[in-house]
Image: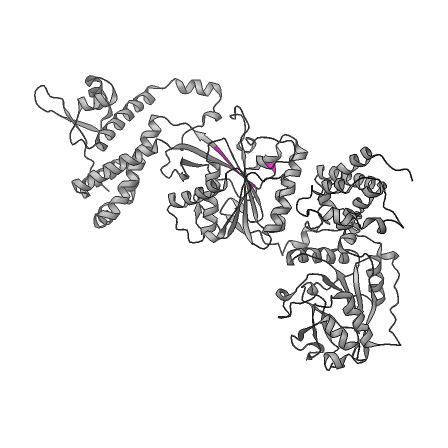
């Protein structure tokens, strides 16, 4: 065979993703490279692309073994060409959003034509050596040092014999094989067996401490059993499906027990692989008993009698040699699309909806995008949300389900991120009672594309039971062109994979596109492809609100009103309960009257001083509106809020409700906004007077004169006098010849 050039080999090798190769294909690539005259360094350099499985020095160690094993039937460069073409097909499928991962949500097509499958006889052995059968069974399934669980006692429930107790689990396979080799009778080693009931064995190795799922030492095998079709048809279907069967045992009744290689790394992978296995069997006519899905399950043990029939070993090592090989073969004839279902079948038994994570906004297992311009405090908003979920409290007025949350930090250095969490906890006044519910994965400087990050995240998070994963921000891990619909569809499919595999909500953060946003709906403001507007189940879009003097004055009034409520309730609760009506609590003028009535001069000074300090701090506020696009919940009014480092607070007074974001205004609207009506101008003059008077009060002036106001406002005394007359809420008190008048607020009757 003519060898390929080095350049040709490397060109094909570059198209192969090592992360998508199982162990066998990985070694075949190495053998082919050696055959074609390339070096172990070439194989090592290519293998490094799979950072999750790469181990330094492993390629060079393995390389030295290829010369002998590759001599008889050499693996050539043709294998690399084949894998290159295969992986090019995978990439094409990915661009068309075809799910390819073996551990994805499982739906399968038929692999074989059951009408063409003929029954295959199963013959009971005549020259039967029970001890040898059990030795072969144990040797096939277990390492000599692994503990084996078995049960020989039984009890009768109705007409069915059931295992009598947990059985034994203190001996290893090696000990049992050694004792069986000296005996011909299995019962001499395992104990007395009820001849009507038979006996059972656990097909996965145990830790020697018990027999529950938690005592399973290796998730190696699963049980396939079907007693709804004849044994002969079971035998044929198991073989036709080429299941990777380690041992096939006749139960002594109407079923075969196929011990199938699963080779899972943990219980989560075990569950998914067993679900897939059972789905394939059922779709191809082998109706499997799904009650056998737990890894500590008992199966029938070969070498004993059951109601006059033998429990015996039919065969070993059938079908493919490993789960990966069989799965690859099964996937090659399976398009992974679900069957259509009749609505009539579920009309009276609808599946339950996913539980709510954020009330009226998002369900667990769904996806949410938070989008906004820079400096909107999106990360702080997400941190507030993480705390709300961890502590089971509200977020922006929405109740959150309590549970564990993972915050994936891609932008901040570790220290800054951790300090932000503490700062937000302190600012919202929340006790850190459940900080164990928050995990932070700091990846700044270590971020990888999302299609590589997703499996790593899933592997780390599988046993954490998160109800939410927050990824902030996504521009750090975007795979492909942000404006390409097909590439962004593949990118967002990774969020589906995380949500499906972990059963949690995935919440991610993105920035607005540049330029004028006014003609866009809130769902279309996120930068990049329209996929971002249509993929999430919920979109929360932030847009800034313009602040003017009127808004600032109303904000100051709200601050003073809130503070008045808090101080009255704390300092003079009797007065608060007896004199402050519900309608007073949102009325600035009435609350100012109440504090003057109920507080001492010293307390009133403290109130004015504290209010002034809070108002000074509020100059750092920015105002924002959250507009939502929801798939699962009905529309609700936008949420208006203030952002002052480091938290967002909902505008409970409605100060921001009537504002229109500048980015939402068309040019003609902005021009109209500049031409104020007389009413607007009058309101502006009144607002300026209110602000000046309130500021002087906050400075502690006991008597405020027209001269004080003129100086504060930068106008003449005559202008102040005109505005007081126009306002109507103040009164002038003459202060003697040649002295400026004293200005006071008019008293408000408590009419409620």
The spot of residue 538 in percent (x, y) is 55, 41
138 above or below 567? Answer: below
Of 501 and 135, nearer the camera is 135
Report the quarter where the N terminus lies: top right
The spot of residue 82 in percent (x, y) is 83, 41
Q: Along the horizontal axis of the image, is 667 left or right of 217?
A: left
Q: Along the horizontal axis of the image, is 377 left or right of 142?
A: left
The spot of residue 326 in percent (x, y) is 78, 54
The magenta stretch spans residue 135: no
Residue at 7 percent across and 20 percent down: it is 737
Of 195 and 520, nearer the camera is 195
Report the quarter where the C terminus lies: top left
Q: Along the horizontal axis of the image, is 695 left or right of 291?
A: left
The spot of residue 111 in percent (x, y) is 81, 52
Q: Is residue 342 visible?
A: yes
- Residue at the left extreme, as displayed: 737
Q: Can residue 336 be seen in this view?
A: no
User: Residue 581 is drawn in which quadrant?
Assistant: top left
- For the record, the magenta segment spans 533-542
């Amino acid at each position: 065979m003519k060898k390929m050039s080095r350049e040709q080999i490397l060109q094909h090798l570059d198209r192969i993703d090592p992360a998508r190769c199982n162990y066998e294909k990985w070694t075949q690539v190495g053998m082919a490279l050696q055959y074609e005259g390339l070096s172990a360094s070439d194989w090592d350099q290519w293998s490094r692309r799979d950072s999750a499985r790469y181990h330094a020095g492993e390629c060079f160690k393995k390389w030295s073994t290829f010369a002998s094993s590759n001599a008889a039937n050499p693996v050539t460069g043709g294998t690399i060409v084949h894998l290159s073409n295969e992986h090019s097909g995978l990439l094409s499928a990915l661009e068309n959003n075809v799910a390819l991962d073996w551990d994805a949500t499982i739906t399968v097509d038929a692999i074989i034509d059951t009408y063409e499958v003929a029954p295959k006889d199963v013959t009971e052995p005549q020259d039967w050596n029970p001890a040898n059968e059990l030795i072969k069974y144990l040797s096939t399934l277990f390492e000599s040092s692994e503990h084996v669980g078995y049960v020989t006692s039984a009890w009768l429930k109705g007409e069915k014999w059931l295992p009598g107790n947990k059985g034994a689990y203190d001996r290893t396979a090696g000990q049992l094989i050694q004792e069986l080799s000296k005996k011909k009778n299995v019962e001499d080693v395992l104990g007395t067996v009820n001849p009507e009931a038979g006996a059972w064995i656990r097909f996965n190795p145990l830790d020697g401490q018990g027999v529950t799922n938690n005592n399973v030492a290796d998730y190696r095998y699963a049980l396939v059993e079907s007693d709804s079709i004849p044994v002969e048809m079971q035998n044929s279907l198991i073989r036709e499906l080429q299941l990777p069967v380690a041992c096939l045992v006749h139960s002594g009744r109407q079923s075969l027990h196929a011990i199938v290689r699963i080779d899972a790394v943990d219980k989560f992978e075990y569950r998914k692989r067993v679900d897939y296995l059972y789905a394939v069997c059922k779709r191809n006519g082998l109706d499997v008993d799904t009650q056998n899905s737990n890894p500590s399950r008992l199966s029938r043990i070969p070498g004993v009698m059951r109601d006059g029939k033998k429990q015996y070993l039919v065969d070993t090592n059938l079908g493919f040699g490993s789960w990966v090989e069989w799965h690859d073969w099964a996937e090659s004839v399976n398009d992974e699309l679900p069957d259509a279902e009749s609505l009539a079948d579920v009309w009276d038994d609808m599946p339950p909806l996913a539980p709510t994570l954020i009330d009226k906004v998002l369900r667990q297992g769904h996806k949410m995008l938070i989008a906004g311009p820079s400096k909107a405090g999106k990360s702080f908003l997400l941190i507030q949300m993480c705390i709300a979920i961890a502590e089971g409290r509200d977020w922006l007025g929405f109740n959150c389900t309590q549970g564990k949350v993972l915050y994936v930090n891609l932008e901040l250095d570790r220290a800054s991120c951790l300090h932000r969490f503490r700062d937000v906890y302190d600012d919202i006044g929340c006790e850190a009672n459940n900080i164990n519910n928050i995990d932070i994965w700091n990846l700044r400087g270590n971020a990888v594309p999302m299609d590589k990050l997703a499996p790593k995240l899933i592997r780390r998070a599988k046993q954490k039971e998160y109800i939410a994963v927050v990824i902030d921000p996504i521009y750090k891990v975007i795979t492909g062109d942000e404006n390409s619909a097909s590439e962004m569809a593949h990118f967002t499919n990774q969020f589906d994979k995380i949500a499906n595999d972990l059963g949690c909500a995935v919440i991610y953060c993105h920035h607005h596109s540049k330029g004028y946003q006014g003609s866009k709906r809130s769902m279309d403001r996120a930068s990049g492809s329209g996929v971002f507007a249509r993929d999430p189940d919920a979109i929360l879009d932030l847009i800034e609100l313009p602040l003017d003097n009127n808004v600032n004055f109303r904000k100051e009034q709200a601050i003073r009103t809130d503070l008045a409520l808090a101080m009255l309730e704390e300092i003079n609760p009797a007065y608060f309960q007896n004199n402050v009506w519900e309608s007073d609590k949102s009325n600035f003028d009435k609350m100012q009257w109440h504090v003057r009535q109920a507080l001492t001069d010293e307390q009133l000074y403290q109130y004015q001083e504290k209010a002034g300090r809070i108002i000074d701090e509020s100059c750092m506020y920015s105002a924002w509106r959250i507009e939502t696009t929801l798939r699962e919940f009905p529309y609700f009014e936008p949420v208006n809020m203030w952002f002052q480092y480091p938290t967002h607070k909902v505008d409970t007074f409605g100060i921001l409700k009537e504002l229109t974001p500048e980015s939402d205004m068309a040019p003609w609207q902005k021009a109209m906004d500049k031409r104020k009506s007389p009413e607007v101008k009058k309101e502006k003059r009144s607002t300026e007077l209110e602000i000046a008077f309130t500021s002087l009060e906050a400075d502690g002036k006991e008597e405020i004169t027209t001269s004080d106001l003129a100086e504060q406002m930068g106008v003449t005394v005559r202008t102040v006098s005109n505005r007081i007359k126009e306002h109507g809420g103040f009164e002038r008190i003459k202060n003697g010849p040649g002295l400026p008048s004293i200005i006071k607020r008019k008293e408000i009757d408590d009419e409620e």
